[in-house]
Structure formats: C-alpha cells, structure tokens
Amino acid sequence: MKKLLSLIGLLLLALVLAIGGVLLLSDSPMKTVESFAMRHADKLPLAYLGEKLFDQHCSSCHDNPAMHAPSREALSGFSKETVMVALEFGKMQPMAAHLSKQERGLIAIYLAGSAPADEWIAQHGCKSPATDNSTEFVTNWGLGTDNRRFMSGERAGINRANVGGLELAWSLAFPKVTDMRSQPAIIGDTLYLGDKTGKLYAIDRHSGCIRAHTEVLSGIRSAITVVTLNNGKKLLVFADSMASIYAVDPVSLKKVWQEAARIYETSVITGSISYHDDRLFVPVSSYEVAVSGSPTHVCCKSHGGVIALDATNGNKLWEWHGTADATLQGRNRDGGDIYGPSGVSVWSTPTIDAKRNRIYIGTGENLSRPATDTSDAIVALDMDTGKLAWLFQALADDVWNAACLNGGANCPENAGGDFDFGASVIMAELPDGGELLLAGQKSGQVYALNPDPAGRDGELVWQQQVSNAGIGPDLEQSTTNGGVHWGMALSGERLLVAAADPERVRPDYVPNPGLHALNLADGAVLWFQPVTRGCEIAEEDKPMIGLQNMRAGKKIELADQYRCSFYYGLSAAVLATEELVFSAGLDGKIRAFDIASGDLLWEARTAKSFEANNGITGHGGAIDVSGQVMADGWLYVQSGYSMFGQLPGNMLLAYRVAGAP
C-alpha cells in the first residue's frame, strides 16, 4: 500500500506542477492526496494502477485455468460496482480482505474499463435539443423535502380513467448492469439517469434517445437530486459507490465539484441526498455489517451518520455521528478482538423540516456491543449544527451483523433481529393543521411521532403493525428481510405502506407481503391488498437470506429464477397521487392500485427479455429501491436488482397513457 500511495503521490505532484496548482497540507495529508486524486481521476492512470494490483494479488488464480476462476477477460464484462460488491462483501471478500477500499476500487476500475460497451450511446443520440428545460417533475428521492413520495394527478397525467391504458412506448438496456437503483430526475423533456457503471445520462424522456452523457469514478447509487441554489444556478447532485458526492451542470453534464463523504473506509452512501438553503444533507451508512461475516474481520469499528455540505462548493459544514468512536471491548469466542460501539447506519434520505430548522433520519442497528440508544431510532438534528434535538428509539438492544447468518464468531451474544429503519421519514400534515412524523421499520411496525416532543426521548402518537417480520430476538431466528424497506407514500389522509415479507421458516412468522393503506390520524388499516407468487419453487431451490446467499447460495439457473422468482414481495418505495398508488414487486411486476379501495387497476410484467430501442438485448428483473417515477402521462420503471439473490436486470422502461405528449 505504501508503494501505491507513493506512486499516486508522485503522479499528483507531477500533475500539480504541470498545472501550476498548489496542494495544501492539512491535518491528514493522505486524505488530502486521496481527495485530490478523486477529483482529478480522469487525469491519472487509474486503470494502470489497478492492473498492477490485479497482477500482484489476483492473477495467480484468475490467470490460471487450473483454478477454474473467471479470467480477467470474463471479469471485464462486469461493471465497476459489481466487482466492488464481490470484493467487499461477496464471494471474493475473504481473498480481498487485506486490500484497502482504494486498492479494491482501482482493481474494479481496471477490470470494468477493459472492454468497450459504449458504442450504442453515439448511435442512439438525439438529433434535436430539448424544448422544455424548466418544468420540474421529479427533483429528489421523496418528490419533495417532506419525503411524501406524492405527485399531483395533474402533474402525473395518470389517473383512474386512463391508467388501464398504459403501454410500453420505449425501452433502454444498459450493458454491464445487473442492478437499476438510482432514481431518475425529470426536468421538462429530459430524464437524468445514473447507472451502475458510473455513467450519467440525459435522456429524451419521450423517445429514449441520449442527449448527453458523462462518467464518474464508480457506480451511481443515490437518486439524482436537482438543486436550485440561492443564486438561481441549478445542479444535479448524486453519490457514487465510493462515497463521493458529485455536483454537475444539468445542461453540459460537466462536473462543478466533487467531494468525498466518508467517515470510515467502509462508509457508503445508500440513501439519497437532501437539499435546503444552499446545504446538502448526506446520509452515511457502512457495509461493515456485511464484511463482519468474515471470520478474519476485526469487528466492529465503523458507524453511520450525516454529513452536511455547502451545496455551492462541497465544503463540509458539520458531521453527526451515530455512536462514539469504537474502543476495544474484549474478545469473541474465537479469541479475536471485538470493538464497539458501532453501527447505527443511516440508510435512508433525510427529511427537511424548515419550520423547525431540523432534519429527521432513521437509523440502523448496532453491529457490536455496547448497544446505544441511537440504534433503530428516529433522530431529529438541528439543521445548522447537526446537534441532537431529540430521538425516539423504536427497538432497544438490536445488535446484529452478518456473522449471525452463519453462526460466525463476530455475531454478538443475544443478537437482535436486524430491524433498522430503511424507509425515509415522512413529514405529514393533519386536517386540523397538526403535524406527524411517519416511519416504517423492517420489523413490520409503522410509527407516528410528534415532531414537538416535550423531552429528548421523542413521543409516540400511534403505532401499527403491517407485518410480523419482527419476531422475537433469537440467534437462530434473526432477520427475515421482511417488513418495510425503501419507502412509504402519503396521499391526503392515507399512508401507503408496502411490505416485502419473503417466505422464511420462522416460529410464529407468517409472511404478509402486500400493500396497506393506513389512516393518517390513528393508523387504522383502511385496506390491504396482498400479493402472491403464483408459482411453486422446490424447497431445495429456495435461496438463503440476503448476504449469506451472496456468498454461498446454491446456483439456480437464471431462466428458472425468471420463470418463478422466490422473492415477490413489495420492497421498492411506493408512489402515490390523489387517485392511484404504484407499487412494484421483487418478481418484476409493476402495479397500480386504486387509492380509495385498493383494487388493482393495472399490472405489467417486466422480468422478461426485451429488444430495447437502443439496439441491445436486455432483460428486466426484480424491481426494488425507487421503483418508478412519473411525468405528464408517462411512467418510468427501472427493472433489475440482484443484490441479495433477486432477479438481475438492466432495463429502463417507459410506459405512456393514450394521448400523452
């Protein structure tokens, strides 16, 4: 590593001298060097460095046919993020554990860059410019800073009367992509989409042609957030898989600034970025929850948090940390060191409360003991300083990591159930002018909180159970990967809640996947629309849970998985209008329900092969994360998500109602 850093330092020094710049020293010179390198990655021979690392650490297996490992040529067919996932917490994690995140990233850059896959972009370019650059249809994850994921029927252009006529108008397939996770932004005639290879596209949303594109260092994970600065300038802001934040010009797609947003080497941005008054609020999570499953990993030193940045230049304003710094706590049963406290990742997108000058976040479980009161909690932070205003802990003593899936030594004693908050908090207004904060948990519980509690500990107004995924804490029964995942939606006095609930064998656990409508005032269930698989899977072909399946799951032919998906629940964030609610399934089905009755009004199957309009044969898969967005009679669906053994796919599908422009 020292030789690599020295080489990077020499390259940077040469670059600085060449352009006449000055590299300022700080309290952390290597972080300064790394930050500078990330900002000027296009001027550095990163693929060359990655090749040297591959030769040193990987070639003995991958260049040796006797080892039956994929060749470097075969690996070049994957995206940078796919390689990173394999190295950081997939099957290659034990072999890559001695490498730093930066070294793994360089290897991924080398492999993904060794096979061209961009010819289609020029061939599918637009022949005319956009005519509307002003109408903002989708500008952030929550379709507003309150994270209600609501769009008026007038703006959506889709209603009860015409939703049944939605038909596929065009499709795009993206090479080297198996997961479609970055929610697009829509301004006027242009849809902005980031993909897993690190490309950002400006797409004509009516025809699917490509207006412009650019590329960043690694896969784009977050939603594309549209920022209008106080001076009137617009930016597109997003995070990549290396936890770098980018701001680009929406017309030229040129980078305005770039800044790292990591607390630890294992930090990653899973949620999306919120904006208010020239400030960005970045949620920080950690994939140490996954790597802790490796017996060689020293668990656990990382925690999550929130970083506030100046939106004009990316400068850091403040940080909130989910726990204190970890210290040595003792030994695990194999004699390895155990550190804590840790965990408390922030997986979701912060909610803005401008009136109270606060942001609200949900947090994840602790990874190691001691447990903290900030885990599995809703946290209110002062927007100016990041200081804690109050917190509501929904579940205490939830201490869990991936070692609990295989009985590993890093699994804490009396482990919890992994019942974090993944869905963003919703800021809701009651008919009488009062307000509530709404939060959905992986335990299957939905909470309504008073945004003005009397004390530090928060105040529960009502609670409703939509899934019994949160069964009692027990080492053998932890985490079903059920409950509420990516997001709820609020339409008037109806809260729409999707439950994922896979079929797992657990005492007293009865899967209840489907869509619930709850009354905003008291949480009463107004209706429930279940979803079913509709096909049979042999018991021996059912996958293991989440991260465990990534490492050692039985190989099932993709054709069989597409024919009958084990996963079929509703994990993706939902989207609502006054009349409709859209919710997509892990089996690739996108559905529209009547918001008053819960009746199914429209459904389309996406987990199938497509001859896409950009000349590439693609395939849809599971629909997860953001699911879908709408604009003026159009519905845009991203199909494909293979992260936890679900159905891979690489499709952007554009559906249009009759008469839409």
Image: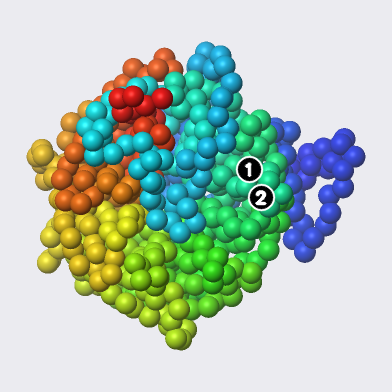
Q: Position of residue 161 (x, y in %)?
A: 23, 35
Q: Given the image, on which type of amino acid does mark 2 rest?
A: Leu
Residue that mark 2 sits on: 229
Horizontal side of 390 relative to 56 (left or right) equals left
Q: Is residue 1 visible?
A: no
Tell me the crowding category of disc 2: few under 14, some 14 to 19, or many 20 or more residues within 10 angstroms, Cα based. some
* Quarter location, residue 605: top left
Q: Nearer the viewer, residue 336 or 364?
A: 364
Extreme residue toward the bottom, this view: 455
Question: Along the line of sight, which residue is nearer the eye, 374 or 390?
Answer: 390
Task: Please tell me whether mark 2 sits on a helix, a strand or a loop.
Answer: loop
* Element on which disc 1 rests: strand
Q: Determine contact: label 1, label 2, CB under 8 Å.
A: yes
Please state the horizontal and vertical placement of residue 153, each as a whole percent of the image. 35, 43
The quarter of the rendered structure image containing the C terminus is top left
At label 1, counting other C-alpha atoms closer than 10 Å, the crowd grade (few under 14, some 14-19, many 20 or more) is: many
